[in-house]
Image (cartoon, helix red, strand yellow):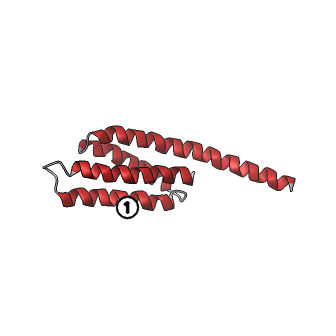
Amino acid sequence: MRTLCASTLIGEFFVVGFAGLVAMKDPDLTMSTVWTVCGITMLLCVLLCGVITRPGGVQLGWALQIALIASGFVVPIMFFMGAVFAALWWASIHFGRKIDEAKARFAAQAEAEA
């Protein structure tokens, strides 16, 4: 699960950075505001990669997905991108857990055969 979730978060890291470039074009936003928000979000994406398997890590990831969707109020395409990444986040968790269970089963079988 960790690998799939981390891959999704690193993808979000880049999307948030590109969304920051788009948000800079908004005359109502200052450059410092845009890059402070984007920088914090990008940092959270990277830090969350390391804590995804700890208690509350998945919930923090969901909170990040909600924030990514909500960023569509500033950059409208982020409604779509946020939904795509929320779906990827769900798939990463769902299929990642299945993969972890299968690995544990295969390890138990290999141990029993040895």
| Residue 78 spot, x, y in % from top left | 31, 42
Residue pictured at 50% horizontal, 54% vertical: 6
The x and y percentages for residue 63 are 40, 50
Question: How many numbered badges does the structure rendering display?
Answer: 1
Horizontal relation, residue 26 to residue 3: left or right: left
The image shows residue 77 at horizontal and vertical percentages of: 29, 39
User: Which quadrant does the C terminus fall into?
Assistant: bottom right
For the point 53% across and 45% down, which residue is it?
92
As drawn, the residue found furthest toward the right would be 114
In this view, the residue in front, 106 or 21, is: 21
Residue 107 as seen in the image, left or right of residue 97: right
Q: Quadrant of residue 82?
A: top left
Q: Which residue is mark 1?
A: 43
Question: How many C-alpha atoms fall within 10 Å of the one at disc 1: few (<14), some, or many (≥20)?
Answer: few
In the image, residue 57 above or below residue 77? below
- For the point 37% across and 45% down, the residue is 66
Q: Amino acid at mark 1?
A: Leu
Q: Which residue ends up furthest to the left in the rendered image?
A: 27
* Left or right relative to 106: residue 113: right
Instruction: Name the spot of residue 111 as percent of width and height, x first.
Output: 81, 56
Q: Determine the secondary structure under disc 1.
A: helix
Give the residue displayed 50% in from the left and 61% down from the top: 51
Q: Is residue 49 above or below residue 71?
A: below
40 relative to 93 in the view: left or right: left
